[in-house]
Every structure is written in structure tokens, then in C-alpha cells.
Image (cartoon, grey):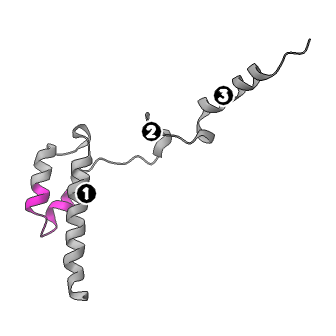
Amino acid sequence: MLRYLPFLLVLALWIYAFVDCLNTPEEDVRGMPKLAWVFVILLFGEVLVGPIAWLIAGRPRRTAGGAAETPGRWIAPDDNPEFLKSLNKDDLKDDPKPE
């Protein structure tokens, strides 16, 4: 069983790089066009050159800021300042005004 482990690790990296390349938007791919990266990953996957090249040179860089800096990403309600402001507005509308 242990003798199959290197083969399975190579196969897992190959599949991961291929799926990651396919799921990456075309405008975020670095270095070469997306179709070229797919061919590099598929042709040189057995010797790990293609998947490692994709992970190092082709994959988009991730920002350290995370979801808060990326527009359009989902933010938890307790971290979303717009949602918290809307709660204050709703509370003021529901309270009857003293006469």
C-alpha cells in the first residue's frame, strides 16, 4: 500500500492544479493564456513540472487582507458596517415617539 503513495500524491497534485486552473477566471491568470496553462498542466503533470509551474507562476496571487477588501464577497452580518447601520435605522422607526 505504501508503494502507491507517491503515485497518489502526484495524481492528487495534478488534479488539484488542473481543477484550480479551470476555476480561475481568465483575467486573473498570470504568465500565459488559460488554455496554454491547461495544456502545460496536462502534458507535464506526470513529472510535476506543469502543476508546480501553475502553482508558482500562473495562479493568481491571494491578498493578505482577505474577504473584507474584496468587493462582492459575502461578509458576516456582525462584520458588515452597512448591516449594523440598518439595524439602528430600523430600531428608530419601530419606537413610538413620546408625545
Q: Residue furthest top?
A: 99
Disc 2 secondary structure class:
loop
Compared with residue 88, is residue 46 higher up or lower down, i.e. above or below?
A: below
> How would you rate the neighbour count of disc 2 (Cα within 10 Å): few for under 14, some for 14-19, many for 20 or more?
few
Pointer 1 residue:
55
Residue 96 falls within the magenta-colored stretch: no
Q: Is residue 51 magenta?
A: yes
Q: CA distance from mark 3 to mark 1?
A: 41 Å
Instruction: Report the span colored magenta.
Output: 40-56
- The answer to whether mark 2 and mark 3 are in CB contact below 8 A is no
Give the distance between the C-alpha atoms of the residues marked 2 and 3, in whole angstroms.
19 Å
Label 3 is placed on what type of residue?
Answer: Lys
At which x and y percent is residue 92? 76, 22
Identify the element where label 3 is drawn.
helix
Crowding at dot 3, Cα within 10 Å, few <14 / some 14-19 / many 20+, comes out as few
Q: Residue at x 66, y 28 (%)?
A: 85
Q: For the point 22% across and 53% down, which residue is it?
A: 57
| 65 vs 4, nearest the viewer | 4
Residue 85 got which mark?
Answer: 3
